Amino acid sequence: MNFTVSLSPSGRQFVAASDKPILQSAEAAGLILPYGCRNGACGACKSRLLAGEVEHGPSPEATLPASERTMGQILLCCAQPRSDLSIEAREAEALRDMPIKTLPCRVERLERCASDVMMVALKLPANERLQFRAGQYIQFLLKDGKKRDFSIANAPHDDSSITLHIRLVPDGHFTRHVFEGMKVKEIMRLRGPLGTFYLREDTNRPILLLAGGTGFAPIKALIEDAFHRGITRPMTFYWGARDQAGLYMDELARSWTETHAGFRYIPVLSDVSPDAGWSGRTGLVHRAVLEDIDDLSGYEVYACGAPAMIDAARQDFAERGLPADAFFADSFTYAAEAGA
Ligand code: FES
């Protein structure tokens, strides 16, 4: 059975089948709505149902608690329509002409940035290009049929190779292979670009960027892209890690403060020992933002890290006045890798 879905504020409509997630029907109609993981884990597709009824399907309680369901929140990647719907969701217009491709690639370089972080540079075939927006991710299509998602760490103007920052996941077969078995020239298959995490440009709001650990990868791409394109909105980057080693490109981030007047960098460590000689900020990275800024109503936030960090930031920033549509997140979903 088919229903009509109307989007607010654009007023666009599409037909959605009752046996498919709303996100999938939107894509079939050529509309790109916000998404990340596509499996209920990240919350990037969370939207408000203004009218109509849905079946929440496999929406996990952790991502969409009962309290949010009663407030009309839905996950577009899980919910199926049960009537005509009106949904508040902004389309990712900037991705409209960006084809998602499946391509072979070759490992060009492997560089250990920290004991548990590997920079992997991938080369595409000479006649291929991957068009993408800074902040998007690619998916490795593994031989056993599994898929692994990683954010692209380079900006689109610097696309001689695709670079990823891969963190070693305890018991993760793929990431262990990256650290122990992967060789230069190894052939992989990737699909991308994916996700709707990219810099919105319909506002002049100052930008707060928040990264936990290797959440730095897409944030690095956003920052380098913004610099390259001469975006002059003030940017403050908070990078959280357990210890100094976790700030694996600290020097690069510090160098940006010297070359770009409107850019600030605030590293925050959560588990630093007293004899480490650290005189900087400590605690949870999103709390550092709250310590610095009382009223977030005029900002736009881009956050990438573990789900707990993203959820806490989303909630606490909203309490400080950040509008829901000014918070963009790319949430890690390590869990899928563990034990795989
Ligand atoms: S895309 Fe729907 S929860 Fe991640």
Image (cartoon, rainbow, N blue to C red):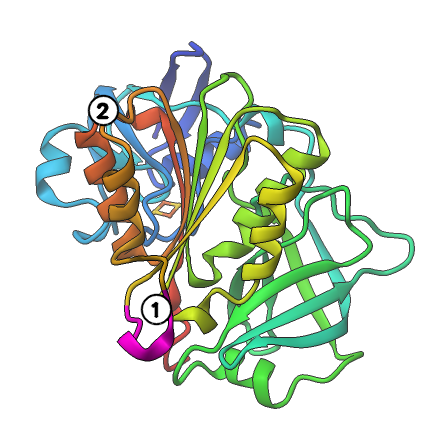
Side of 262 where 7 appears, left or right: left
Q: Are marks 2 and 1 in contact (CB under 8 Å)?
A: no
Query: Which residue position holds label 1?
Result: 242
Residue 137, visible in the rendered structure? no
Kind of residue indicated by mark 1: Arg
Please give the label number shown on residue 151. Answer: none
- Callout 2 secondary element: loop
Q: Residue at x 50, y 55 (%)?
A: 216
Between marks 2 and 1 in the image, the one whose residue lies nearer the viewer: 1
Counting from the top left corner in percent of width and height, residue 247 is at 48, 64
Label 2 CB, ligand 1: below 8 Å? Answer: no
Quarter of the figure that contains the N terminus = top left
Q: Residue 317 appears in which quarter of the rendering? A: top left
Q: Is residue 276 above or below residue 44?
A: below
Side of 181 where 322 appears, left or right: left
Q: Is residue 87 above or below residue 172?
A: above
Kind of residue indicated by mark 2: Gly
Label 2 to label 1: alpha-carbon separation: 28 Å
Q: Nearer the viewer, residue 259 or 21?
A: 259
Q: Residue at x 36, y 76 (%)?
A: 276
Dominant SS type (magenta): loop
Q: Residue furthest bottom?
A: 180
The magenta segment: 271-278
Please give the label number shown on residue 321. Answer: 2
- Answer few, some or many: residues within 10 Å of disc 1's Cα (few below 14, many 20 plus, some between 14 and 19): some
Residue 275 highlighted magenta (yes or no): yes
Q: Residue at x 86, y 60 (%)?
A: 125
Counting from the top left corner in percent of width and height, residue 45 is at 37, 38
Q: Residue at x 67, y 42 (%)?
A: 132
